[in-house]
């Protein structure tokens, strides 16, 4: 107290005022807790678009701008094609991109395409993988201003190799040498930077994939390729169960039989996301699934994480026997994680949705959900409430996070969708939110 009085005397301020300022400053610091929405972003931390569509993918530019992608619906419910949206760092639409911040593309084919994965090249060009219901699986490239890059593929679009499986999910990843990996419809394919098939990869450019539903790609420092997959086989009693796996391929597209069991390791339920730690260990996200309820889907009852050693064996030092399951309490007992990121200090962010009833894309309420774990698989109690965050976007909304990314300052950006039932079915709005990372 004597020290505070001396300082106040030197500044010619009353000691009581100085103490009050110190208390206010301390309170402000205490309020800025990791897991809170960043009030400096968009409107109280959340950007909600004025148009209809699913927001599926997210990437951060080197200048901090945010690119999200999915598809676009008219007010009448017509699917107009794949969509790219770019936001400024403060969460406002970047009107220098496309038309008022938005690009709508049929990828040279037709409407009805959904962008499900994007990546940004070092030169700022944007790669977007899109799927349709024909089926179709294409990748397009866009210039930094949102215009089609006609130097890529044919008039800006590259069509993948023929296949016979329906495309449920498609993902892409950009290699350090500029080559492009694509997975979907039962294959893993590589394109040259020009958009042409790289015939030096696999067999004439493609390697067979164990599942028809790849969900995520991660690239190791040695050039090997990790791929997560998910299956939804229907059981004999009509129940739907979920299964997932993680596979590893060599840099030239051969299955790496030194990984797991002949190149493959089992995963928790449907493997939805993958991330590599700095020490080479592998974290995979996938919900704990129960089939205690009737179809059409199994019920996701908690965030699931499993960690593997670099050889594909389970890392039993992580969580409990190598994994961790997180529920969101009695008010939101059904939860599923779709996205994953690892912070610079080793903390793990998982993101998805949680709600009071089974999450199966019917018209039941659900909220955005995040959890943060320490590097050894324990909930980080400094994040949100006991390591968990739930963001309710409306009492009747079906809301979910589909992708997440970490800014250079550690803050967490998520791409999400939120909508309510209507006569047209469930057609949501794009949502982008930013949470404090520390």
Image (cartoon, rainbow, N blue to C red):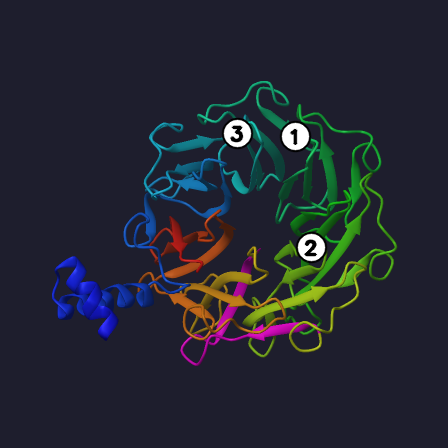
Numbered label attached to residue 14 = none
- For the residues labelled 3 and 2, the Cα–Cα distance comes to 27 Å
- Dot 1 or dot 2: first in sequence order is 1
Do the numbered discs 1 and 3 sit on residues whose CB atoms are within 8 Å?
A: no
Choose top left, top right, bottom left or bottom right for residue 286: bottom right
Task: Give the percent coordinates (x, y) of residue 270.
Answer: 64, 62
- As helix, strand or loop, the secondary structure at mark 1 comes to strand
Q: Residues within 10 Å of mark 1 (few under 14, many from 20)?
A: some
Percent coordinates x, y for residue 374 in the rendering: 57, 68
Question: Image height check: is 170 above or below 367?
Answer: above
| Residue 162 in sight here | no
3 or 2: tag closer to the N-terminus: 3
Q: CA distance from mark 1 to mark 3?
A: 22 Å
Q: Magenta region: which residues?
A: 322-341
Question: Residue at the spot x=64%, y=55% of the render?
Answer: 275
Disc 1/disc 2 C-alpha distance (Å): 23 Å
């Amino acid at each position: 107290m004597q020290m505070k009085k001396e300082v106040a005397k030197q500044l010619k301020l009353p000691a009581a005022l100085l103490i009050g300022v110190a208390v206010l400053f301390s309170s402000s610091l205490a309020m800025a807790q990791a897991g809170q929405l960043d009030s400096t972003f968009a409107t109280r931390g959340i950007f909600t678009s004025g148009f209809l569509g699913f927001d599926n993918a997210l990437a951060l530019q080197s200048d901090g701008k945010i690119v999200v992608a999915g598809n676009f619906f008219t007010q009448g419910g017509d699917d107009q094609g794949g969509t790219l949206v770019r936001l400024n760092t403060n969460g406002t639409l970047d009107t220098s991109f496309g038309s008022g911040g938005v690009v709508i593309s049929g990828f040279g084919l037709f409407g009805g395409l959904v962008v499900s994965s994007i990546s940004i090249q070092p030169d700022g060009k944007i790669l977007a993988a899109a799927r349709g219901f024909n089926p179709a699986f294409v990748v397009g490239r866009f210039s930094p201003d949102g215009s089609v890059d006609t130097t890529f593929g044919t008039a800006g679009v590259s069509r993948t190799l023929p296949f016979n499986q329906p495309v449920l999910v498609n993902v892409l990843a950009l290699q350090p040498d500029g080559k492009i990996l694509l997975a979907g419809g039962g294959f893993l394919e590589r394109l040259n930077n020009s958009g042409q098939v790289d015939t030096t990869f696999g067999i004439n450019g493609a390697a067979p994939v164990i599942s028809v539903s790849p969900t995520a790609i991660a690239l190791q420092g040695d050039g090997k390729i990790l791929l997560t997959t998910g299956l939804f086989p229907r059981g004999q009693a009509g129940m739907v169960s979920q299964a997932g796996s993680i596979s590893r391929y060599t840099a030239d597209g051969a299955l790496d039989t030194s990984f797991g069991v002949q190149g493959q390791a089992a995963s928790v339920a449907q493997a939805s996301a993958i991330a590599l730690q700095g020490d080479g260990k592998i974290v995979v996200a996938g919900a704990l699934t129960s089939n205690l309820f009737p179809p059409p889907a199994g019920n996701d009852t908690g965030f699931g994480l499993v960690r593997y050693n670099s050889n594909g064996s389970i890392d039993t030092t992580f969580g409990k026997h190598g994994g961790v399951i997180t529920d969101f309490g009695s008010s939101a007992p059904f939860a599923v994680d779709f996205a994953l990121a690892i912070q610079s200090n080793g903390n793990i962010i998982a993101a998805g949705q949680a709600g009071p009833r089974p999450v199966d894309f019917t018209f039941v309420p659900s909220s955005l959900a995040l959890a943060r774990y320490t590097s050894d698989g324990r909930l980080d109690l400094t994040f949100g409430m006991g390591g968990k965050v739930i963001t309710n976007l409306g009492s009747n909304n079906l809301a979910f996070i589909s992708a997440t990314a970490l800014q250079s300052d550690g803050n967490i950006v998520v791409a999400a969708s939120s909508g309510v039932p209507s006569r047209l079915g469930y057609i949501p709005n794009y949502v982008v939110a930013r949470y404090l990372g520390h």
